[in-house]
Image (spheres, helix red, strand yellow):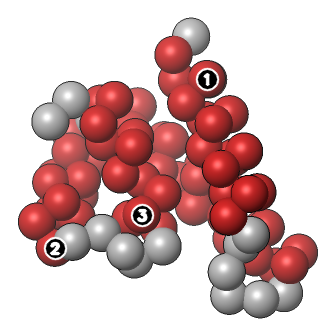
Amino acid sequence: MDCREIIKLISDYIDRELEQVKREILEEHVKVCERCKTILNTTEKTIFLSKKIYKNKKVPRKIEKVLFYQIRIRYKK
Ligand SMILES: [Zn+2]
């Protein structure tokens, strides 16, 4: 699996909605890929902060989409 596919999985990974197999692939990938590791960490932090702001477990899907869109844009550059 290449970086682009990994990035797509990050959202579900953070939401704990990723199936076991894919989760393992992602975890293995970030061990060896500094770029994806950074993206994962940044995304986790952002989601965590958003959750604090929204004070509920789930960040509105809309907000999440915007976040990941921005991350992907950044990644493409
Ligand atoms: Zn990668």
Residue positioned most to the bottom: 56
Look at the numbered discs 1 and 2 and tell me whether their residues touch, using CB distance below 8 Å: no
Say which quarter of the image contains residue 54: bottom right
Q: Point out residue 35 in the picture as x, y percentages from the top left corner.
A: 40, 31
Residue drawn at x 30%, y 42% as measured from the top left? 6
Q: Considering only order in the chain, which callout, 1 or 3, is on the residue closer to the N terminus?
A: 3
The residue identified by callout 1 is 73
Give the class, few, some or many, for how many residues have Cα within 10 Å of label 3's Cα (few <14, many ≥20): some
The residue identified by callout 2 is 20
Q: In this rendering, would 2 be left or right of 73?
A: left
Residue positioned most to the front: 62
Q: Point out residue 49 in the picture as x, y percentages from the top left corner.
A: 77, 68
Of helix, strand and loop, which one carries label 3?
helix
Residue drawn at x 68%, y 88% as measured from the top left? 57
Give the residue type at disc 3: Asp
Q: Where 51 sits versus 34, above or below? A: below
The residue identified by callout 3 is 12
Q: Point out residue 39 in the picture as x, y percentages from the top left corner.
A: 50, 41
- Asked if residue 22 shows in the view, the reply is yes
Q: In this rendering, would 1 be left or right of 66?
A: left
Q: In this rendering, would 1 be left or right of 37?
A: left
